[in-house]
Amino acid sequence: MKFKTLLAGVALAICSGTMAFAAETLTISSWLPPTHPINTGMLEGLVKMMEEATDGQVTGEIKMGLAPPPAQMDLVMDGAADMTIIFHGYQPGRFVGTKLIELPGYKGNAEAASVAYWHVQEKYLNQLDEHRGVKLVALTTHGPGQIHSNKAINKLSDLKGLKTRLGGGVSADVGAELGLIGIQVPAPKVYETLASGAADAVAMNMGERISFKLNEVAKNVYEMPGGFYRGSFAVLMSQEKFDSLPADVQKALDEKVFGLPASQMMGKVWDESDARARAETEAAPDNKIVTASEEDQAAFAVMAERVRAKILGELDDAGIDAQAAYDMVASEMAAASK
């Protein structure tokens, strides 16, 4: 009887411990609108992946409005949230290596770019240690960034002098080449910035026409094949929180979720969002997409080469073999797009 009682007690203790850990819910901070694909597709997708990989021992809850976009990394480092997603361009001077994926001229979609991004991070960019203090969970980039405006743009020269919201990073360098007057506001402020007339245009990927209702306030799209730029994002986790998880849970997350799997998943979500927005824009009678002429594509290629030279120079100065890193990304993406 005593032996049975002892076994029952051990079983209860094990069960209680498992149940206590099963209740562990990671607080995931987001600064995007609730319906944005980053929330509904990427972060919710990440939660599902973590649940499946750990047999339900780890889950997550997405919370909005904990801090403004530029403060998200510090929010995790301070322990106010367990995870977050950041846009590197919102913190000028803090990140250099992340600009590599933002360069214009790459062939391929967001999934291919996100996969190549993680690979080049492992081979070259990790040595910069730019995400020190937190655990890097995933890297991704949205699809080709285009110009969305409230007036018709029919040729490259029409962009000169256009008051345009630029997100930072390489988009700012490209904007300077194009002669845009850069306005920097966080993405959630784009609609009101355009609606108020404070800006004439915005540089964003196609999917944001739905996410930020650009089809209402920026009914014209000037599209450069391959995009004018891309945008770099990272999912970060508190290193302290990760270290507090049981070893088997850490192993499951590292092997089945974090890194390449999560990065690839996020790239797919960007592509699906871009495809939906393009279809809606093409179907809207008052929206218009103008594709750059071959002449304008050639003119932009010259500008893009100057931007690449500038950014690769910054990476060289940081101690990275910039050309090798760039060639790696370009070749991987080109191969994936065939």
Image (cartoon, helix red, strand yellow):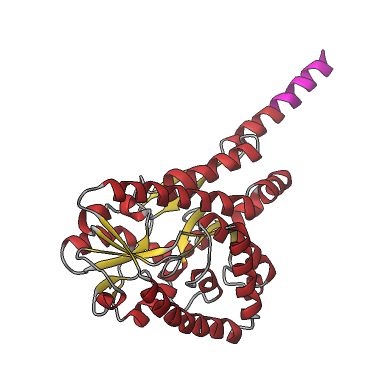
Q: Quadrant of the C terminus?
A: bottom right
Horizontal side of 12 relative to 303 (left or right) equals: right
Of residue 220 and residue 318, the one placed in the foreground of this image is 220
Point out residue 210 in the picture as x, y percentages from the top left corner.
32, 50
Dominant secondary-structure state across the stretch colored magenta: helix
The magenta region covers 1-13
Q: In the image, residue 284 lies at what x, y percent?
A: 25, 47
Which residue sits at x=55%, y=61%? 113
Q: Nearer the viewer, residue 334 or 127?
A: 334
Pinpoint residue 41: horizontal percent, then vertical percent. Answer: 46, 45
Q: Is residue 11 covered in magenta?
A: yes
58 to the left or right of 164: right
Question: In which quadrant will I find the N terminus?
Answer: top right
In terms of image quadrants, where is residue 19?
top right
Q: Residue furthest front?
A: 294
Q: So how many labels did they put on this image?
A: 0
Q: Give whichever of 48, 301 is nearer the camera.
A: 301
Question: Is-magenta flag for residue 314?
Answer: no
Please tell me which residue is depicted at 22% across the width and 69% down the height of the picture.
Answer: 199
- Farthest residue to the left: give it: 196
